[in-house]
Amino acid sequence: MFDVDGVLVDSLKRSFKLEQEVVHALGGRVPSFEEFRGSSHRGSWKEYYAQFGVDSEQALDLFYKRLTYESLTSVPGVIETLEELEKIRLKRESRKGRLKFGIASLARSPDRVRKKLEIARLAKYCSDSNVYTAKQDKSVVIRQELKVYSIEPRNEVIVTDTGMT
């Protein structure tokens, strides 16, 4: 299971700058980089935005209205890594214990994830069946993927740039 932002797509700095603009525009206290970086795995969006004095629905709406995907790139080394994993997957396809890819994001829809991956030239690793999204909690995404693929948690490998609980 691969996280999108910061792992597959190099979008962290752009998202952080936009987050600062959104919170400032809504009259809140602008988050530090550390606060922003930890936002994807600690509690709900409502709790996250409350600490800066802004409404989560307003903030998320404004964030996604202003979000653009121009010139997104893949994280260095990602394409080569995915190519190697694809070779392994194809070798194992005829055997028991197939290797499967999953892509997880806190984006509001799989279409947003696919668009990011397309611009970053990673679309060939993305299909309707392997993109999982959740508005608040990546653990929801991971449980969904485990259920769909009938994978035991001990057999899951998660590649992310944020802590998971």
Image (cartoon, rainbow, N blue to C red):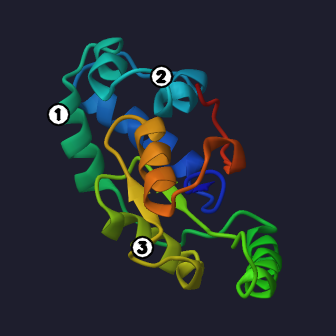
Would you name the residue on which mark 3 appears?
A: 129
Q: Reply above or below: 30 against 124.
A: above
Q: Reply above or below: 32 against 123.
A: above
Q: How far apart are marks 1 and 2 (CA)?
A: 17 Å
The answer to which of 153 and 53 lies nearer the viewer is 153
Residue 125 left/right relative to 43: right
Residue 134 left/right relative to 100: left
Task: Tell me if mark 3 has few (under 14), some (14-19) or many (20+) residues whose alpha carbon lies within 10 angstroms of its own.
Answer: few
At which x and y percent is residue 87? Answer: 80, 84
The residue at the point 53 percent across, 21 percent down is: 35
Q: Which amino acid does label 1 sit on?
A: Glu
The answer to which of 159 and 37 lies nearer the viewer is 159
The label on residue 42 is 2
Secondary structure category for the residue under label 3:
loop
Q: Distance between the residues labelled 2 and 3?
A: 27 Å
Q: How far apart are marks 3 and 1 (CA)?
A: 28 Å
